[in-house]
Amino acid sequence: MAMGGSGDDPRRRSLSRRRLSGRAAVGCLQEQVSGSVVTILDAYGSLFFAAGPKLKESLSSADGAHCPVVVLRLRGRENLHTATIALIREYATELTAAGGRLYLAGVGPEMEDQLCRTGLLELLEPGAVVRATDEL
C-alpha cells in the first residue's frame, strides 16, 4: 500500500520479502497477507481522519493467514490522528489473532510518546516499534 499520488488515493503496492529465499519484490499488494512473506507497507500522504477509511481498505486481510508479519512504515510523521491509531490497533489485533505481528517502522520521538499515551505501544509486542534514524 502506498498512500500518495493525486490526493489521498491509495495505491496498492508492497515490498514483500520471502522468508525462506530472502528475495525482495515490489508488486501489487495481495488481498490477504501470507505467513510466507514479510509485507512492508509504505504510507504516503495524509493519515488524518478522512484518510482512515482509505487506509483501512488498503490493508491486506489476515483472515486465514498463519503467522503473517506486516511492517507499516511511518517515517516523516510527527503524530497520527486518533482514528488512525484506532485503525492500527484493530489491524494489530487482527494480525495477532492469526499468530502474526505488526511492526511500526520509522517512528519519531513525538509519535512514540503518542503511541505510549494512547496505549498502542503497550498492545504491540516489545521490539515492534522501530525508531526513525538517519540510516536506511
Image (cartoon, rainbow, N blue to C red):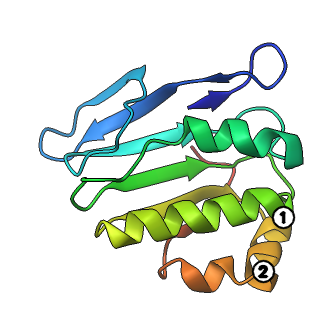
**The one of 60 and 28 positioned closer to us in this rendering:** 60
Residue 32, above or below 110: above
Mark 2 element type: loop
CA separation in Å, label 1 and label 2: 9 Å
- The residue at the point 82 percent across, 74 percent down is 114
- The residue at the point 42 percent across, 32 percent down is 15
Q: Which mark is residue 118?
A: 2
Q: Are marks 1 and 2 in contact (CB under 8 Å)?
A: yes
Kindly identify the amino acid type of the residue bearing the numbered disc 1.
Answer: Thr
Residue 120, above or below 4: below
Kindly identify the amino acid type of the residue bearing the numbered disc 2.
Answer: Thr
Kindly identify which residue carries mark 1. Answer: 82
View extreme (top): residue: 6
Residue 119 lies in quadrant: bottom right
Image quarter (top left, top right, bottom left or bottom right) of the N terminus: top right
Mark 1 element type: helix
